[in-house]
Amino acid sequence: MDGKSRDKLFACIGALSFVMDDLRIYLDTHPRDQEALDYWKKVEKVRNEAVKEYTKCYGPINMYDVDVDDRWTWAEGPWPWEGRC
């Protein structure tokens, strides 16, 4: 993947995260809204797939995505906010 693909994928994750944050606020006050719950599950699945793809290609976005094998790799590589993503 090239830099543009990386940028697009990162932007997509950001947009999906925003949707989930907005839905979370709504669901806090409407916890039984089945349509909103179904939409949450749909968006969550797409976001998780995007994060998995990003992590596989470019490294973790947050510490929960670190693949710990023989060392802690969270601090390796460029950080997403350093303008290299």
Image (cartoon, rainbow, N blue to C red):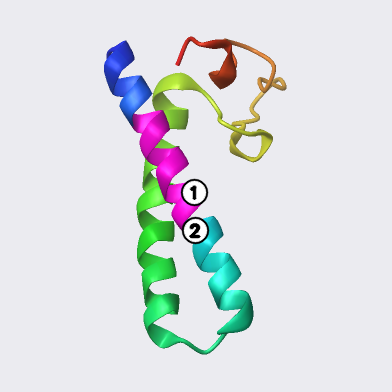
Is most of the magenta stretch helix, strand or loop?
A: helix
x and y percentages locating residue 45 in the rendered image: 39, 58
- The residue tagged 1 is 17
C-beta proximity under 8 Å, tags 2 and 1: yes
The region drawn magenta spans 9-19
Element class at badge 1? helix
Q: In front: 66, or 19?
A: 19
Q: Is residue 82 above or below residue 59?
A: above
Q: Is residue 63 above or below residue 46?
A: above
x and y percentages locating residue 52 in the rendered image: 43, 39
x and y percentages locating residue 1 in the rendered image: 27, 17
x and y percentages locating residue 83 in the rendered image: 51, 11
Residue 13 is one of the magenta-drawn residues: yes
Using the image, tell me which numbered label, if any, was put on residue 20: 2
Q: Is residue 72 above or below residue 49?
A: above
Element class at badge 2? helix
Which residue is located at x 65 percent, y 30 percent? 68
